[in-house]
Amino acid sequence: MSLLDGGVAELAAAVRSRQVSAAEVLEEALARIEEAETELHCFNTVMLEAARAQAEAVDGAIAAGRDPGQLAGVPVALKDNMCTRGTPTTCSSKILQNWVPPYDGTVVRRLAEAGAVAVGKTNLDEFAMGSSTENSAFGPTRNPWDLGRVPGGSSGGSAAAVAAGLVPLSFGSDTGGSIRQPASFCGVVGVKPTYGLVSRYGLVAFASSLDQIGSFGATVADAALALEVAAGHDPLDSTSLDLPAPRLVEALGEGVEGLRVGVVDDFLAEVAPSCSLAAVAAAEALAAAGASCENVSIPEMLLGLPAYYIIAPAEASSNLARYDGVRYGLRVDGPDVETMNARTRAAGFGAEVRRRIMIGTYALSAGYYDAYYGQAQRARTILIRAFDAAYERFDVLVAPSTPSSAFAFGAKTEDPIEMYMSDLCTIPSNLSGHPAVSVPFALDSDGLPVGVQVLAPALGEPVMLRVAAALEAVAPPGVRGPVRPAASSSAVATGGGGGGRAGEGGGEVAGG
Ligand code: GLN
């Protein structure tokens, strides 16, 4: 077995002890990317030269007797809304197609300082608005489990890259579910940390009161280690919590004995049976491992989706005002400044981004502000209070990650509301600022992965990830990646129920 398919800590240890060089590890990852990329399109940019230079620097440090850090030689993929100095950062938008940031985001810098090797920028829904990567201006990413299906979104490229084993780690952003939903669709672990735990300096803003950077890994331990490296106070982000980075990996094996687990009832009737069954099975598994599990009704959870689809577009309409043809990226000239602005934005933004800007502008406009934005903020407060009450009784909550498993290309592109419904179970934790993680826990009848969410109160990452690790330990075999996209079209022994993975045929990829 290749070191790339084992744990991240083991891979870094092998590089640190010179069992393998960072350069060799990188070349293997690049070969895998080269082989899979035509089919999958996980990446907008593969950072060949920069990655080779970074790997060489890691090997050089080791040769000189220095320790490059916890992620020595580990290839990582970065969502293409995270600023990378000298490498385009497009947000999968035509408006930023040729924009090259002059600086690295804090997470990008911290990863490099820990010895990780950034291999590329992953595809997303334009400006992280969407749930399938079909809103990318550069064409969608395919799900390695079934090439006719979406990988989820908006961090679909990051999820698919880990699911296909191209890289052992990746990072994404989660504003309403964009890490957890693709993690669930792709059979990988995806963590959305507490608001403020990970610096957003250098993350292109979508909705600033909700955006968080988080990690993807094949296992809870990998995603937790990545988060440890990325987390911690950053004076460059005014929303960053002034706390040391939490220790997450060391407690993972402590089990769930005595923990109080609430199973959120309100989603169970709203999602596909495969998703509600997975959540119920997860609760049973935790009970068998010594936790006390109880169903809990938190009807306020259902306020999340409508509140989010006012608040997020409102903030987006303001954040995206900066793309004016003057300061960043694309410019389409006109006889006067106003026409130039309008032409630039009409040519540069895709349909969904324009829709969000219009909804947000409307919701914030005089005369409508209180009825829409004000009302959504009140709903948000009510939801937060309901969470607070639940966390007086429970250490963590368990819920489905998504209303369905991965859907076919084109299945939801005609009806925006249908697409928005994908975020039903993930949005509440963004509105509350709480952490949540999706862990692969089942396969549906098509052999597709189904994730389960563990939710925790603010800064509850240690207990949340412990519960996630306990679930991972008892999840049926075959529920998680990596899967080989090429091999997945024929019979693949999944071990778990639900039969083999589909992969041939499937839907046509609807071009972006
Ligand atoms: N799918 C949600 C949206 O389109 C969430 C996106 C995200 O988390 N970035 O807004």
Image (cartoon, helix red, strand yellow):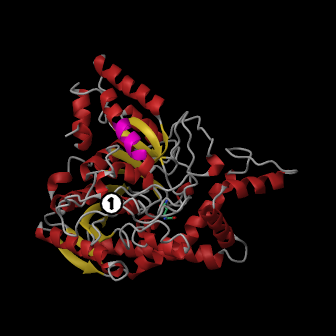
Main secondary structure along the magenta-highlighted residues: helix
Q: Is residue 62 left or right of residue 96?
A: left
At 28% across and 62% down in the image, what residue appears?
501
Query: Where is the N terminus found, in terms of image quarters?
Result: top left
Residue extending furthest toward the right: 335
| 506 relative to 264 in the view: left or right | right
What residue is rendered at 41% in x and 28% in y?
Answer: 52
Give the quarter of the image for residue 298: bottom left
- Check disc 1 and report its element: helix, strand or loop: strand
120 is within the stretch colored magenta: no
Position of residue 31 measured from the top left corner of the image (x, y, whole percent): 36, 36
Foreground residue among 312 and 331: 331
Image coordinates of residue 46 in percent, x first then y, are 47, 38
Q: How many callouts does the rendering have? A: 1
| Residue 372 in sight from this viewpoint | yes
Residue 397 image point, x, y percent: 29, 70
Query: Does the residue tagged 1 have its C-beta within 8 Å of any atom of ligand 1?
Result: no
Q: Which residue is mark 1?
A: 437
Q: Nearer the viewer, residue 477 or 326?
A: 477
Query: Furthest-top residue in view?
Result: 64
Q: Is residue 86 above or below residue 353?
A: above
| Left or right of 361 on screen, residue 133 | left
Check if residue 32 falls in the magenta segment. Answer: yes
Chain part drawn in magenta: 29-37
Query: What residue lies at 38% left-to-right and 36% top-to-bottom?
Result: 30
Residue type indicated by callout 1? Val
Residue drawn where x is 46% and y is 74% of the image: 421
